[in-house]
């Protein structure tokens, strides 16, 4: 018998380890989803189904139609920011990016590991216009701008919340920690891009040199380096696009505030500050609990907490979360129709994203 190592087994080992991690994340996602459904039922029961239905009826179909249009405008801002994030000589039009963003948002919302494949879904959706690695790097570039503006938005919201309202000492301390962490990450991200630190490729190279995941990193480390170079190359070649992209990302959040303000106005509240705080918490929950499809339960929990703190009433907070969930369901359905129309498959997208 040959004593030579089985190279196929060595190459398959990293994939098997990766699959185990993904399986654990899927299991965690399922557990969190079940818990979220339980939370949703509890909050609906505690507030009272009749009160919630009454609020939804007051909001009306006309109000819901406006919410759908506002969210399309939000999609348009992300699509415009992505369009500007594509590396020369490649280009995308809004006709390419708008459907791709809708598809990505649908994937992100409806499956437990949606956050891991939403960016890949966008790149796959435009694969006939861009090479996959270019599409992925452009999505990553846009996500960097989005993360930067979102961090500023969350910092402002957290500061206004903790300084403007009476909170328990535990909550105040937790939010102060959040402000510090967000501020630190924001500074680190700026320095990383300006200095062009190749963290990911250097880690891959060190792992490869030490014999870890050699089958996976044999070609993968070069692809990671190329991916980083494409992102940093954008910083060097297109500095004039920075401000427009940031303005589009800021418009995304401002439209979110407008959405909440419209709901509050039709329910008898009209405070822009309250709309800002509710949107801030909603965005934070969406980021933290992306493993939970449609952030069911946790969105209601966060909205109720903020609504009670700002004296708007628990029923108002739950109603806002449910109305916005209806908006998410509508646009997720549109995303699924686009996936079918373009001949894509969820399995193909998940496989490309490594899920």
Image (cartoon, grey):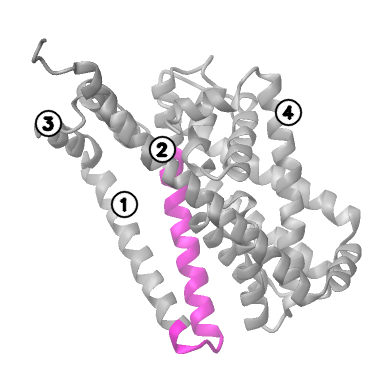
- Nearer to us: label 2 or label 4: 4
Residue ID for mark 3: 211
Residue 240: image location, x then y, percent: 41, 38
Is residue 347 shown above or below 180? above
The residue identified by callout 4 is 337
Task: Identify which residue is drawn at 74% across, 37% down.
Answer: 333
Disc 1 to disc 3: CB gap under 8 Å: no
Which callout, 4 or 1, points to the residue nearer the camera? 4
Mark 3 residue element: loop
Task: Determine if the magenta segment contains residue 250.
Answer: no
Q: Which quadrant holds residue 353? A: top left
**Inter-mark Cα distance, 3 to 2:** 31 Å
Which dot, 4 or 3, sits closer to the camera?
3
Q: Earlier in the sequence, mark 2 or mark 4?
A: 2
Residue 213 coordinates in the image, percent (x, y): 21, 30
Tell me, yes or no, whether the two marked residues, 2 and 4, touch with CB atoms within 8 Å: no
Q: Earlier in the sequence, mark 3 or mark 2?
A: 2
Circle 1: element type = helix
Q: CA distance from mark 2 to mark 1?
A: 12 Å
Q: Which residues are magenta?
A: 142-170
* Cα–Cα gap, marks 2 and 4: 27 Å
Res. 189 mark: 1
Direction from residue 152 to residue 47 in the image, left or right: right
**Along the line of sight, the residue nearer the viewer: 107 or 216:** 216
Which sits earlier in the primary sequence, circle 2 or circle 1? 2
- Corner quadrant of residue 173: bottom left
Image location of residue 1, percent across then percent down: 11, 10
* Label 4, label 1: how far apart the Cα atoms are: 36 Å
- Compared with 184, 208 (above or below) is above
Q: Which residue is mark 2?
A: 141
Q: Residues within 10 Å of mark 1 (few under 14, many from 20)?
A: some
Viewer-nearest of discs 1 and 3:
3
């Amino acid at each position: 018998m040959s004593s030579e190592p089985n190279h196929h087994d060595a190459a398959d080992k990293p994939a098997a380890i990766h699959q185990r991690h993904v399986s654990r994340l899927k299991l965690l996602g399922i557990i969190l989803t079940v818990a979220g459904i339980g939370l949703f039922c509890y909050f609906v029961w505690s507030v009272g189904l009749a009160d919630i239905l009454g609020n939804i009826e007051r909001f009306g179909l006309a109000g819901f139609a406006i919410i759908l249009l506002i969210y399309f405008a939000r999609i348009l801002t992300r699509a415009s920011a992505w369009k500007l994030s594509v590396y020369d000589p490649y280009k995308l039009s809004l006709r390419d990016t708008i459907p791709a963003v809708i598809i990505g948002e649908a994937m992100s919302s409806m499956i437990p590991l949606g956050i891991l494949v939403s960016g890949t879904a966008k790149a796959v959706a435009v694969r006939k216009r861009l090479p996959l690695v270019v599409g992925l790097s452009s999505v990553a570039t846009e996500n960097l701008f989005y993360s930067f503006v979102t961090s500023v938005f969350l910092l402002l919201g957290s500061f206004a919340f903790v300084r403007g309202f009476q909170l328990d000492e535990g909550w105040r301390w937790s939010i102060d920690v959040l402000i510090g962490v967000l501020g630190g990450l924001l500074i680190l991200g700026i320095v990383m891009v300006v200095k062009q630190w190749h963290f990911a490729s250097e880690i891959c190279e060190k792992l490869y040199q030490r014999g870890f995941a050699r089958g996976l990193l044999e070609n993968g480390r070069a692809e990671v380096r190329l991916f980083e170079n494409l992102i940093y190359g954008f910083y060097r070649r297109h500095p004039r696009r920075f401000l427009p992209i940031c303005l589009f990302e800021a418009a995304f959040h401002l439209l979110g505030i407008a959405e909440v303000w419209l709901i509050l106005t039709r329910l008898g509240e009209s405070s822009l500050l309250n709309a800002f705080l509710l949107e801030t918490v909603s965005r934070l929950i969406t980021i933290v609990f992306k493993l939970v499809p449609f952030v069911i339960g946790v969105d209601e929990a966060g909205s109720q907490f903020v609504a009670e703190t700002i004296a708007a009433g628990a029923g108002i907070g739950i109603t806002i979360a449910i109305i916005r969930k209806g908006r998410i369901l509508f646009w997720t359905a549109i995303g699924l129709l686009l996936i079918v129309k373009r001949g894509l498959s969820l399995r193909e997208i998940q496989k490309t994203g490594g899920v």
